Structure formats: structure tokens, C-alpha cells
Amino acid sequence: MEPFKQEFQVIWADLDPNAHMRHTAYNDYAAQVRVGLFDELNLPLAKLVASGYGPILFHEDTSFKSEVFMNERITVTCTAQAFRKDLKIWKFRQDVLKQNGKLACTIIATGAFMDLKQRKVVVPPQEIIDMLESIPQAEDFYWLEKE
């Protein structure tokens, strides 16, 4: 199964003083793609919040490979890198590809779903589990050990 992906054009506000895309812009685009993926899988943020759950991040591990410049088109992909067996914790792998196809950056986002009333991380309800299980898996997908 192909990874979920979206294309963007790098704008002036994405640049740093070195005239290439600033480090946090990569993470901004990755977050937008995760939200777009949830929309694509019929769980937009508004629907999630209305159901009492919201996605949270524990951390993002970002590895930079190649510079991206203003007006360049980038494609950001998203696949499931790892799940805990109960799907309480997830990792998504996201690649930022330059318009020539060269890898510019890889982001591994680790997160979970929070019960917005209890304000704690929980095993998500079945609708969210079904959505997570339908996300294309990375080639090196693995199962996380329970913490």
C-alpha cells in the first residue's frame, strides 16, 4: 500500500537566514500531513474532539538530509512505523521529498490519543483503532513493547 502523501510549495515564511527551509517548517508540514491523513480516513480533528479524544505527541525525531529552498515543491509522506499491540502508542514515519525525489528529511513522530475529559492517554475507542489500522505501514514496521 502506498504511503499517504501531500504536496506543498515552500513559501517565504518557511525560510531561515541561510535561505533554506527552517528546521521547524519540516515539522509543521509533517503535522499538516498527519491531520490530512486523519481527514482522509474519515476522522477529522473536529470529529475526534467532538468524540472526546485528541491526538498528542510525545516527541518528534527529525533527521535532515538535504536542503530545501524557496518555491521548491515538496512531498510529505506518512506511514505507520510502529504500534503498541493495544494501539495506545503509535509512531508515524514521515519523509519529506524534494521535487526531484531526493530525501530531504525524515521525521519519526511518537504519540497517542488522549481522553480530553480525563486528560490522560488511553487505549483509543474502536473507531480510532480502525483508523490507525488502516494507515499504510512502513516497510520496516514493527510492534512496540508495552511500557
Image (cartoon, rainbow, N blue to C red):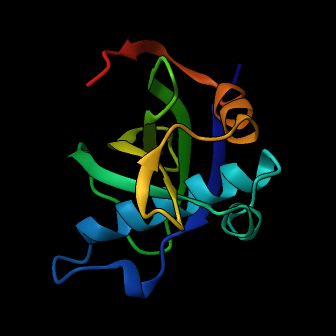
Residue 21 can be seen, yes or no: no
Q: Find residue 144 and report its image quarter.
A: top left
What residue is at 83 percent from the left and 50 percent from the top?
42
Q: Is residue 101 above or below residue 71?
A: above
Residue 45 visible: yes
Q: Which residue occupies the extreme front position in the image?
A: 118
Residue at 42% over, 74% down: 70
Q: Position of residue 106 (x, y in %)?
A: 34, 41
Vertical order, 21 against 144 (above or below) = below
- 67 relative position to 30: left or right: left
Left-right relation of 4 to 84: right
Query: Percent position (x, y) of residue 67?
Result: 27, 56
- Could you tell me which quadrant the C terminus lies in? top left
Q: Nearer the viewer, residue 107 or 129?
A: 129
Q: Is residue 136 left or right of residue 109?
A: right
- The x and y percentages for residue 37 are 67, 49
Quadrant housing residue 91: top left
Which image quadrant: the N terminus?
top right
Name the one closer to the observer, 38 or 79: 38
Q: 18 and 109: which one is in front? A: 109
Q: Is residue 35 above or below residue 37?
A: below
